[in-house]
Amino acid sequence: SVSASSSSSASCGAGDTLTAGVLRRVGLSVVSGNDEFEQQSRQQAHAADSQLQELRRHAQAQAAKCLGQLDVVAKEARAEEERRLVSERVARELEAFRAEQQRKEARESERLSHLY
């Protein structure tokens, strides 16, 4: 009975070794115990956390860049709107000036026609 149990555990050990070898050949690692699994899990969690922090930094930099560009575009839009409003006002005032000049010329022509 002792030899049967030791032979079955030996065959399990050989099977485990064979499985571990096959898994290593296909690129999978075999964790040999709870401590190693815990250490590997901590390392993976740390790596994931580091990657997340880097992604956050990158996202913050991108957001800051976008806000800067948005500010520049908003200033350009305000300046363009101001130019448009000034141009419209100048056009209205010029039209009013021309109309006033035409009225003055018409009155002067009328006055001169009565004189002669």
Image: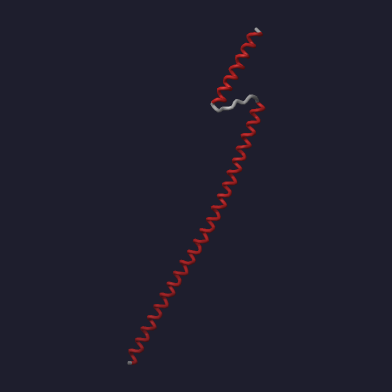
Q: Is the residue 47 above or below the residue 7 in the image?
A: below
Give 62 or 111, whichever is nearer the viewer. Answer: 62
Q: Residue at x 63, y 24 (%)?
A: 32
Give 76 or 28, whichever is nearer the viewer. Answer: 28
Q: Quadrant of residue 112?
A: bottom left
Query: How many numbered tags mark residues here?
Result: 0
Q: Is the residue 24 above or below the residue 102 in the image?
A: above
Q: Residue furthest top?
A: 1
Q: Residue at x 65, y 24 (%)?
A: 33
Q: Residue 97: percent from the left, percent from the top?
A: 42, 78
Q: Residue at x 63, y 37 (%)?
A: 46
Q: Residue at x 63, y 31 (%)?
A: 40
Quadrant containing the C terminus is: bottom left
Q: Residue 72: percent from the left, percent from the top?
A: 53, 58
Q: Quadrant of residue 49?
A: top right
Q: Residue 79: percent from the left, percent from the top?
A: 50, 64
Q: Is the residue 22 above or below the residue 7 in the image?
A: below
Q: Give the left or right position of residue 110, taking residue 67 as reference.
A: left
Give 92 or 74, whichever is nearer the viewer. Answer: 74
Q: Residue 50: percent from the left, percent from the top?
A: 62, 40
Q: Residue furthest bottom?
A: 116
Quadrant containing the N terminus is: top right
The colouring scheme, among rainbow, by chain, secondary structure or one colour, is secondary structure
Q: Is the residue 72 above or below the residue 40 in the image?
A: below
